[in-house]
Structures are given as structure tokens and as C-alpha cells.
Image: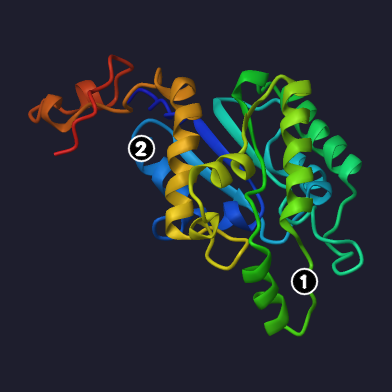
């Protein structure tokens, strides 16, 4: 019996903090992207709740080896923890300039591992609704530890660093505040995404991802094209893939 050739699935890797970790929950933006890419590639959730860009750059080589292979895109979504106010949350706070350097180092590592610049998508922290987040902090006996104005500084740094690295960027901080009069509808607690916020991220991210993944074939034939009398002929071959029919 001939050796069966293993199928290597391309990957879209979502790298970020809790907003990424939670993205596979019901109605999450990561789940939406994974659904769109079913049978074409694996969407891998590498979100780490509470992490900042410093911790991210430390763990990245453990998550994506060098050389990397068959990566269609990587999203890099940090800043919501980095922008924590130093006097209120020194554990997560990262100074603005250091945040920029960390993001740059993350991009440099990805490129050194073989992920081309055009496959890297930075995502800025979303806007923060001060009053809603202050309620969350107060419920834990803490003072307000983040503000939207400071989050905006980190978002701007993210946009600038992406340009310096030759990477794409999704500026959520700007887009969400331009889109509706009250951007709090995009947030569940002032910081994390609501269902509507998840839909917003999924829609805007897909616009950037689509051109990077639309060439990927449908893996393994459509069931209607399988010769039911001799299925091995097409299921074990390296021939043309099926179409995207799902019924």
C-alpha cells in the first residue's frame, strides 16, 4: 500500500490579548472568520487574556516556529492592556515608546520566520468607554485604570508602527468612533467587545483578509464529486480540489 500523503492546511493565526482569546465565543469575530474559511484553512486562536506586547514578544517564538510554513496571515492585536495607567495598573502597563518597539519586534520576528510583511495585520486597541469601564473597576474596589484618550495614543502608535514595518493595520479606535454617535454599543463592559463590536471587527477584518486568502482552494473534493464506488481515487489523490458547496 502506498504511503498516504498528509494534508497541510494553511493557517490564519490570531495573536492577541483577551479580545482575541474571547473571539471564538458565540458571535465572536474569530469564529466568524473561521466559518468563512472552513475547508480552506485553519484559523488558530492564540489569544492570551491580560497579556501586553512585552509578554507577547517573549512568547511568540514558542507559538510560531522559525521557519514558519503555510501561514496565510497573522493578526497582531495588542494595546488594550499596554495602555493601562501606570499608577493604577503597573502590572500590565507598558510605556508608549516601548509598546511601539515591542510591536516592531513582533513584526520583525514574523518576517524572520518567513511570514512576509503583506501577511501581517496589526489591529489597534478599540476605543474605551471611560464611564462603563470605571464601573467595572469600582466593582472590584479599584480606581479607573484606563482611559480612552490614552488608548488613542497607543492606537496611533500602532498605526505608525505598522506603516514603518510595511504591515497592514485595522484602526479600530478610529473606525468605531467614526461609525456611530455612541461607540459604547460596540463594547460589553467599556473595554471588551459586545456582539455588535464582534460583528464590526469581523466585517472590517475580512475586508483585509479576503485578498490574502481568496486564492486558497477548497480542501478535499465536494462530496458530490466523490466516486462512491472508488472514493480512494479522488480522496487520496493530489488532483484538483472541490468547489465550496456545503450541502
First-in-chain label (2 vs 1): 2
Closer to the camera in the image, 19 or 43: 19
Crowding at label 2, few (<14), some or many (≥20) Cα neighbours within 10 Å? some
Crowding at label 1, few (<14), some or many (≥20) Cα neighbours within 10 Å? some
Give residue 64's quadrant in the image: top right
Closer to the camera in the image, 15 or 232: 15
**Helix, strand, or loop for circle 1?**
loop
Return the mark for residue 171: none
**Helix, strand, or loop for circle 2?**
helix
Q: Please count the marks in the image.
A: 2
Give residue 139's quadrant in the image: bottom right
Picture layout, residue 41 above or below residue 200:
above
**Residue labelled with disc 1:** 144
Q: Residue 162: x, y in percent?
A: 72, 28
Q: What residue is rendered at 60% in x and 24% in y? A: 119
Q: In this rendering, does residue 20 appear at all? A: yes
Picture layout, residue 92 above or below residue 112:
below
Name the residue furthest front. Answer: 181
The colour scheme used here is rainbow
Q: What residue is rendered at 62% in x and 70% in y? A: 132
The Cα–Cα distance between marks 2 and 1, rounded to whole angstroms, is 38 Å
Picture layout, residue 64 above or below residue 230:
below
Q: Residue 76: x, y in percent?
A: 66, 39
Q: Residue 147: x, y in percent?
A: 75, 60
Give residue 195's quadrant in the image: bottom left
**Residue labelled with disc 2:** 36
Closer to the camera in the image, 112 or 50: 50
Split into 4 quadrants, where in the image is the C terminus? top left
Amino acid at each position: 500500500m502506498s504511503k498516504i500523503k498528509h494534508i497541510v492546511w494553511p493557517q490564519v493565526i490570531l495573536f492577541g490579548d483577551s479580545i482575541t482569546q474571547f473571539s471564538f465565543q458565540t458571535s465572536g469575530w474569530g469564529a466568524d472568520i473561521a466559518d468563512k474559511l472552513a475547508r480552506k484553512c485553519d484559523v488558530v486562536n492564540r489569544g492570551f487574556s491580560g497579556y501586553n506586547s512585552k509578554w507577547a514578544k517573549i512568547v511568540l517564538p514558542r507559538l510560531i516556529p522559525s521557519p514558519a510554513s503555510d501561514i496565510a496571515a497573522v493578526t497582531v492585536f495588542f494595546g488594550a492592556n499596554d495602555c493601562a495607567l501606570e499608577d493604577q495598573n503597573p502590572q500590565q502597563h507598558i510605556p508608549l515608546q516601548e509598546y511601539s518597539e515591542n510591536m516592531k519586534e513582533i513584526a520583525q520576528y514574523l518576517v524572520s520566520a518567513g511570514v512576509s510583511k503583506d501577511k501581517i495585520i496589526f489591529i489597534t486597541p478599540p476605543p474605551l468607554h471611560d464611564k462603563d469601564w470605571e464601573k467595572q473597576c469600582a466593582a472590584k474596589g479599584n480606581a479607573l485604570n484606563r482611559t480612552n484618550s490614552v488608548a488613542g495614543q497607543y492606537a496611533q502608535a500602532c498605526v505608525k508602527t505598522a506603516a514603518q514595518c510595511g504591515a497592514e493595520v485595522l484602526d479600530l479606535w478610529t473606525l468605531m468612533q467614526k461609525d456611530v454617535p455612541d461607540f459604547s454599543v460596540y463594547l460589553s463592559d467599556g473595554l471588551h467587545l459586545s456582539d455588535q463590536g464582534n460583528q464590526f471587527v469581523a466585517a472590517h477584518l475580512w475586508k483585509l483578509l479576503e485578498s490574502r486568502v481568496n486564492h486558497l482552494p477548497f480542501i478535499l473534493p465536494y462530496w458530490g464529486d466523490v466516486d462512491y464506488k472508488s472514493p480512494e481515487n479522488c480522496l487520496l489523490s493530489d488532483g484538483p480540489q472541490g468547489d465550496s458547496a456545503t450541502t
